Image (cartoon, rainbow, N blue to C red):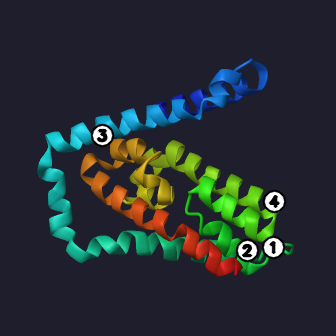
Amino acid sequence: MKSSIVIIIFFALGIFLGYFVDAEMLKSDDKLSTYALHFLLFLIGISIGADLKVFRIIKKLHYRILFVPVSVIAGTFIGVASVSFLFESISLNECLAVGSGFGYYSLSSIYITELRGETLGVIALLSNIIREVITLIGSPFLTKYFGNLAPIASGGATSMDTTLPIITRYSGKEYAVIAVFSGTVLTIIVPFTVTLFLS
């Protein structure tokens, strides 16, 4: 709970600085956040490398590791299809395309904007950002009530990068390999699923 509050505080502080303070240098330097992310991934890699027992989980799961990304895909589509009936102005296929971003907001929103226009592109951007934020803030609750795989499912494609540190912290570093695998699979299929539903 404490760590979630800290995350919210820093997120709100970032919004405040971006809106009220002259932070053009920080906003224009996209590499800054990339470097920070790479450093976090480096530290996680050291943690995993120091305890090679984490790879036993892959040996134990074998082909069953594929069920993680497949379950994320199925759960996302079922959830999005259920919610789509609440929106009259957005078709089922468009809702499924938005869900097909699996949290990968930068790529999916660009694809959707090109195929369906800016309005749906912005919806895709916001919905996928919200998915990432929910994972970052809600991982303690997700692991407590739904199990260690829940943050990986919630993070979707981001479980291989931006949400990996928080997943590792609350699910355990033995789940980091599963998170990276699932996130990689989902990231690869994003262009195909988005295009499929909007073609």
**Residue 44 numbered mark, or none:** 3
Quarter assignment of residue 18? top right
Mark 1–mark 3 Cα distance, whole angstroms, equals 40 Å
Residue 148 appears in the rendering:
no
Quarter assignment of residue 37? top left
Residue type (three-letter) at the residue carrying disc 4: Glu
Tag 1 near tag 2, CB within 8 Å:
yes
Say which residue appears at 50% left-offset and 73% top-offset: 73
Residue type (three-letter) at the residue carrying disc 3: Ile
Choose the circle earlier in sequence order: 3 or 4.
3
**Residue annotated with mark 2:** 94
Tag 2 near tag 4, CB within 8 Å:
no
**Residue annotated with mark 1:** 90
**Residue annotated with mark 4:** 118
Q: Nearer the viewer, mark 2 or mark 4?
A: 4
Question: At numbered mark 3, what does the secondary structure look like: helix, strand or loop?
Answer: helix
